[in-house]
Amino acid sequence: MLASGQYAELEARTEQFEKYFSVYSNRLGLIHNRIFEAAARGHLYGLKEGIAVLRTALIDAQSDDLVLPFAENSPHIIEMLRMIVKENPVNEYLNHEVYF
């Protein structure tokens, strides 16, 4: 859905998927889901809406230094990532070379 630009459908699905990932506390699934939600909201409602969701995914991922989910989806979230990094220039996790 993300690759084909079906952002409204993706946003609706992320709401459903969150319930499934939450049942077993699947943190990686929740992080991926928030990345997809951020991408969808960024395209549907503007970058500020997407950034708000992406920040929560980054906060959750930072404790385990997870970067691959963001790198894998970078074509869809790179502008939002750049804006978040610009606001937090000293955060080593956010300035990870994998993102850029």
Image (cartoon, helix red, strand yellow):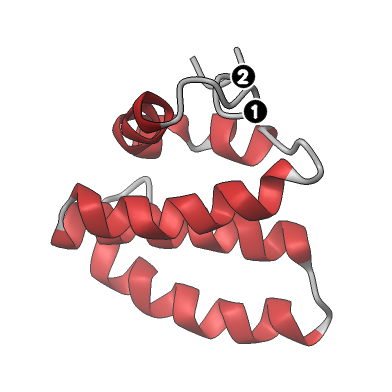
Q: Residue at x 55, y 63 (%)?
A: 33
Location of residue 9 with respect to 76 vertically, above or below:
below
Q: Residue at x 73, y 38 (%)?
A: 66
Badge 2: few (under 14), some or many (20 or more) residues near its Cα, within 10 Å?
few
17 left or right, relative to 49 = right
Location of residue 47 with respect to 66 vertically, above or below:
below
Q: Residue at x 43, y 28 (%)?
A: 85
* Quadrant in which residue 94 is drawn: top right
Q: Residue at x 67, y 33 (%)?
A: 67
Where is residue 98 drawn, in percent x and y? 61, 18
Q: In terms of secondary structure, where does tag 2 sit? A: loop
The residue that mark 2 highlights is 96
The type of residue carrying mark 2 is: His
Badge 1: few (under 14), some or many (20 or more) residues near its Cα, within 10 Å?
some
* Quadrant in which residue 97 is drawn: top right
Residues under numbered marks 1 and 2 in contact, where contact means CB atoms less than 8 Å apart: yes
Identify the image quadrant of the N terminus.
bottom left
Q: Is residue 86 visible?
A: yes
The residue that mark 1 highlights is 93
What is the C-alpha distance between the residues marked 1 and 2? 5 Å
The type of residue carrying mark 1 is: Tyr
Q: In terms of secondary structure, where does tag 1 sit? A: loop
